[in-house]
Amino acid sequence: MRRTLSRVAVVAGVLLVTAILLGPALAPYDPAAPVAGPWTKGGSDHLLGTDVLGRDVLSRAMAGGSHLLAVSLLAAIAASLAGALAGLAAGWAGSRTLNAAADLMIAVPVLLPALLLAVSLPGDIAVVTGTVLAGAPLTLRVVQDATASIRGSGYVRAARLRGERGGAVLLREVMPAMAGLLAADVGLRFVTALQLASALAVLGFGTVSAAGAVSSAGSWAVMLRENLPGAALNPAALVVPALLLAVLALTVAAAAHTGVRHAFGTGETW
């Protein structure tokens, strides 16, 4: 039963990501162009109605996940990579300095540094940097423990007896052994990045790209902020993006949970 649920989570995640990537090309209307009056309820012409500016909600929902997905994935990879490299060093050498820095960063609320960064940086950069600051220390802890346990394994000792240096052993022997763990960690950091990107967009940050241009297609989080005043007129304009964000986060979290269990060979999480 548990294996079936795990496979369902992974398949659902793949299908959802595919739908997000294909969404902009399949949208029935231009997501940036008004097609009817503001907050018109759904009908035959517009299945989910229109938003605050009279744009088709279905088209904006189909086009609103691709940029959010790309930014969150980039942030997750950056956070996991930074945490993994630091965790490898800490687990191999037992660095107290890295541990102390990780403890200090973990104690800071996730949203606080992201808000401070969003004031002075473009939204996407603030999301990536905030995710690294929030997620890398957690990855460091996990990878550090895994590295410490793998360090005494037979194949690592054999590599050291062959005369390989510590850095080469970490990259050639230790890191490949944690591939499943790192893949699952990227999923968990993705959820953090998605939460930060959504929070910043709802608060009015995160809609400006690094090039300084405002995205006309917006994102699911931007749809929440824009359509909150008209929730009573066309609830779909608010409910649909909220559901899409929740489904994406839950699906990725479930897939990451599956990866964690397989990495550790148990039914427990870290």
Image (cartoon, rainbow, N blue to C red):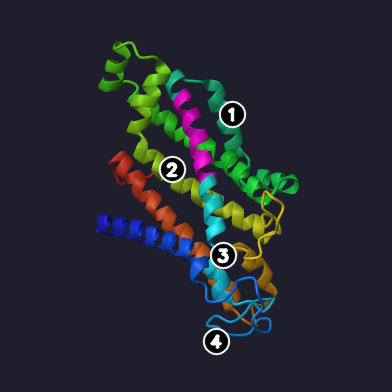
Position of the N terminus, as image quadrant, is bottom left
- What secondary structure is found at the residue carrying circle 3? loop
Callout 4 environment at 10 Å: few (<14), some (14 to 19), or many (20+)?
A: few
Q: Residue 144: x, y in percent?
A: 44, 29
Q: Foreground mark, 4 or 2?
A: 4
Side of 126 relative to 195 (left or right): right
Q: Amino acid at mark 3?
A: Gly
Identify the residue under disc 1. 101
Identify the residue under disc 3. 64
Does the CB distance between marks 2 and 3 fall below 8 Å? no
Identify the residue under disc 2. 185
Q: Foreground mark, 1 or 3?
A: 3
Question: Marks 1/2: CA distance?
Answer: 20 Å
User: Which of marks 2 and 4 precedes in the sequence?
Assistant: 4
Q: Which mark is residue 45?
A: 4
User: Which of marks 4 and 3 precedes in the sequence?
Assistant: 4
